[in-house]
Each structure stands twice: as structure tokens, then as C-alpha cells.
Image: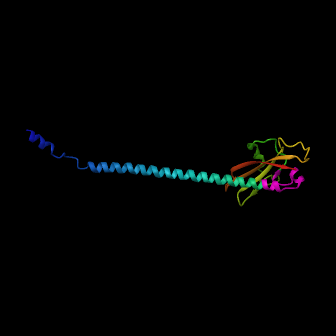
Amino acid sequence: MAFFALKKMSRPVTHQDGSVLFFTLMILVIMAAAGLTMISNTVLESKIVRNASSRTLNFYAAEAAAMEAAQRLENETNVTRLNTHNAVWLNPNGPSDPPLADFNQAWTLSGSGQNAVFNAATNTAYTTVRVGVAKSASLGLENPDLLWEYSVLGRYYDSNNTPIAMIEVGFKKRY
């Protein structure tokens, strides 16, 4: 009887001809899903990097416009021009200690109230707002000239002339 039981156990199991194909297809589906997930993540990360790069370039363009205005302000020697609105980009009567959000009125790029310079080649604009006599400035005992504080602003615009990036730089000039 033991011989007969041993012979029965050694007989192959029937009705499992497609099981290897089924498990192979399951592994293939799992690997395809993992591959699609990796591709999706790679595409998303590329978009993130592209947006970050674009934002950085926009910021640098706005900063370059502000630096151009600061350089022009530094090079300006005409005190009358610094004290009046003789130059389009100089705004001598700015509010006292203005927050950045209040500078929207400082961006008239054309027309009779123009108070900013727009560079169409670089899609940037700049303007300056004189804040007033700088805090902790000298009383003028040793130097009669006052130290004036300016807010120098630069903006970068997209192709639709919508402002994309804006930067404010503090600037002081004695005259």
C-alpha cells in the first residue's frame, strides 16, 4: 500500500498548463506600470526644473534693469535733475518709506505721465523713487550735502507686456 501511495504522489498535477504564462504576464504588467510611473515622474521633474530656470532668468532680468537704473542714478551729477522730475526715470517725490506694493503708480511706461523707462529689446523697465533723507544720515556739520535714499525698481515683462518679476534695490546718494 505504501508503494501505491508513493506512486500517486509522484503523478503530475493536471490542468495547470497556462499558469506560467499568467504569472509572466502579471510581472510584465507590474513592470510596465512601474516604468510609466518613472516616466511620469521624470516629465514632472523636467517641468519643475524648467520653471525654476525660467523664474531665475526673469529675476536676473529684473535685477539687471534695477542695476541699470542704479548706475544711471550714480552717474547723475545734475542736482537740479535729481531734485525735480526732469528725467523720466527719476521720481523725486516718492512716499516716505513705501512698501513694494505701493509702487504700482510708479510704472507708467508711456504717455504724459511716463515715469519709467521701458527697454523693448530686453522686455525690462526701471524707475527710481526718492524716499527722502536717509535715516541716520549726517546732520551736515562736516559735509553740507545730504544723504538721500532711493528705491530703485526693475521689472521684467513677458511677451504680452505683463510684469513677471520685480525687484527693489535700496540706493543712497549724497548731494
Where does residue 151 sit, x and y in percent of width and height? 78, 47
Q: Position of residue 76 (x, y in %)?
A: 84, 56
User: 72 or 37, which is in the foreground?
Assistant: 72
Q: Is residue 71 magenta?
A: yes
* Horizontal side, residue 34 vs residue 108: left or right: left
Does residue 74 show up? yes
Q: Residue at x 87, y 43 (%)?
A: 138
Please state the horizontal and vertical placement of residue 154, each as a whole percent of the image: 74, 52
Apparent side of residue 11 relative to residue 90 in the rendered image (left or right): left
Q: How was this image coloured?
A: rainbow
Answer with the quarter of the image where residue 160 lies.
bottom right
Q: Which residue: 89% across, 48% down?
A: 145
Outermost residue, front direction?
A: 142
Bounds of the magenta span?
70-90
In the image, farthest residue toward the left: 1
Quadrant of image for the N terminus:
top left
Query: Does the segment drawn in magenta span residue 45?
Result: no
- The answer, for residue 84, to whether it is visible in the render is no
- Determine which quarter of the picture holds residue 157: bottom right
